[in-house]
């Protein structure tokens, strides 16, 4: 076993949305640990697959950026209470989630599939 000091001294900044911060804190509280310990535990125990090809990484990065922009647009639409824009943004986010899932061969579940216009 590696002999380590009791105090951790290295910091990693992680940018999150308000709702993500709340979710992480709630999950940490539910397991009886700090948010730092929770994230450390999640990060250090994750099993990673082989790195995907560069074009898939580019698609994922672009889709992630687009999703962030759509989420911000959704928040603005909710502030103006424009249900038509809210609905269209939610559909766009669902389609984007399907694209991301396809790029990584992930199972997105039926809830996201229902939001897709092609499913109707």
Image: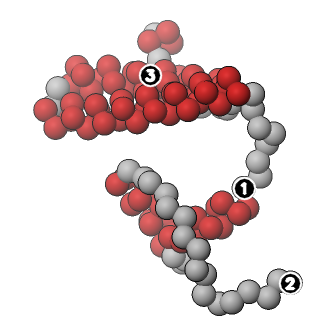
Q: Say which of marks 1 and 2 sits in front.
A: 2
Q: Earlier in the sequence, mark 2 or mark 3?
A: 2
Q: Which mark is residue 1?
A: 2
Crowd around label 2: few <14 · some 14–19 · many ≥20 (10 Å): few
Residue tagged by mark 3? 115
**In front: 97, or 63?**
63
Q: Which quadrant of the structure image shows residue 40?
A: bottom right
Above or below, 40 against 8 in this view is above
Crowd around label 1: few <14 · some 14–19 · many ≥20 (10 Å): few
Which element is circle 3 on? Answer: helix
Is 82 positioned to the left or the right of 102 in the image? left
Residue tagged by mark 1? 46
Q: Which quadrant of the structure image shows residue 110?
A: top right
Whole-Å distance between the Cαs marked 2 and 3? 50 Å
Residue 89: x and y in percent read 33, 24
Q: Are marks 2 and 3 in contact (CB under 8 Å)?
A: no
Residue 75: x and y in percent read 26, 38
Residue 110 seen anywhere in this rendered image of the structure: no
Residue 91: x and y in percent read 39, 21
Which element is circle 2 on? Answer: loop
Residue at 75% of width from left, 28% of height from top? 53
Q: Earlier in the sequence, mark 3 or mark 1?
A: 1
Residue at 38% of width from left, 50% of height from top? 17
Above or below, 81 against 30 in this view is above
Q: Residue furthest front?
A: 10
Residue 13: x and y in percent read 49, 61
Above or below, 79 against 115 in this view is below
């Amino acid at each position: 076993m590696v002999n380590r000091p009791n105090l951790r001294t290295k910091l990693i900044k992680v940018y999150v949305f308000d709702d993500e911060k709340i979710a992480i804190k709630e999950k940490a509280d539910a397991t009886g640990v700090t948010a730092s310990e929770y994230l450390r535990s999640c990060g250090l125990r994750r099993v990673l697959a082989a790195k995907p090809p560069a074009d898939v990484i580019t698609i994922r990065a672009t889709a992630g950026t687009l999703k962030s922009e759509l989420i911000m647009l959704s928040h603005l639409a909710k502030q103006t209470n424009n249900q038509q824009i809210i609905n269209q943004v939610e559909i766009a986010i669902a389609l984007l989630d399907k694209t991301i899932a396809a790029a990584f061969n992930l199972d997105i579940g039926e809830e996201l599939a229902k939001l897709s216009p092609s499913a109707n």
